[in-house]
Amino acid sequence: MDDEQRRQLFEDALDGYEDGPDATVRATATALEASESARSLVLVEGVSDQIAVETLARRLGHDLAAEGIVVLPMCGAHGVGRYLERFGPHGADLRLAGLCDVGEEAIFRRAMKDAGIGNPTNRSEVEQFGFFVCDTDLEDELIRAATRPAIEALLDSQGDLGSFRTIQKQPGWRDRPFPSQMCRYLSAGRRRKSRYARLIIERLDTASVPSPLQNLIAHVTETHPTEEDPP
């Protein structure tokens, strides 16, 4: 595969999404603008999570924009507090949901309490409020769900298998489990997390989608009546 073919595949995988060094900042600004007319807001850590949520929703037949649902990448989990204050019961009072890594679960719990949303003390209670936790993170969940043969075939189809093999041969990574190697690969290259979030979910059997992501989509796309809707 030549460089032009790889470049086209790169652009195709990110079609419709921001690219460049300030992509996350611009994606957040776009989502904040859209939130002004939203009914529901889904808070995620970054653009790769946004792409994963929106790609799965499309595969399941949902048009999030038409349903008044905006997915907002926060540029990191530590921003969740200000967004819950801004859009929760103390602010715009939108219907809120979210997705986070297991390492940030405690941050989300504290922020939910401070914003007057609830006081969850365990994972089950967090999920009752519409916030779902990935173990260890979404990339790890997707890699395990897709399986090694499927991931390697996908890498090959994108012209990336050779560069992945290079990481696998490095002394610090050659004896690590495949999911760890793949997570390292995704974090080491420009927009790899975003590209492969979309590519994996587009090819993954919907029955195999990790439960945090599956449950989030089910939660945010439930029908909830508003003042204009009939009872």
Image (tube, helix red, strand yellow):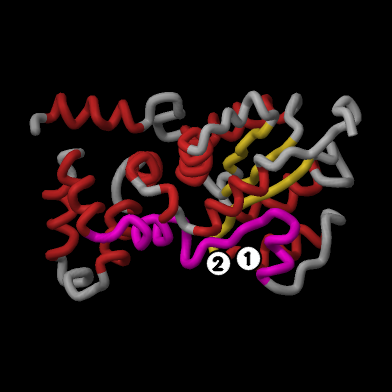
| Above-or-below relation of 167 to 35 | below
* Residue 105 disc label: 1
The quarter of the displayed image where residue 20 is located: top left
- Residue sitting at the far left: 1
Q: Is 207 covered by the magenta stretch?
A: no
> Where does the image place residue 68, in percent across and percent down from the top left?
70, 29
Q: Which residues are magenta?
A: 123-148
The quarter of the displayed image where residue 140 is located: bottom left
Identified at 69% across, 39% down, the residue is 41
| Above-or-below relation of 103 to 76 | below
Report the amino acid beneath label 2: Val
Q: CA distance from mark 1 to mark 2?
A: 5 Å
Q: Residue at label 2?
A: 102
Report the amino acid beneath label 1: Glu
| Above-or-below relation of 115 to 71 | below
> Where does the image place residue 141, in percent across and percent down from the top left?
43, 60
- In the image: residue 104, left or right of residue 160: right
Identified at 33% across, 32% down, the residue is 13
Q: Nearer the viewer, residue 114 or 229?
A: 229
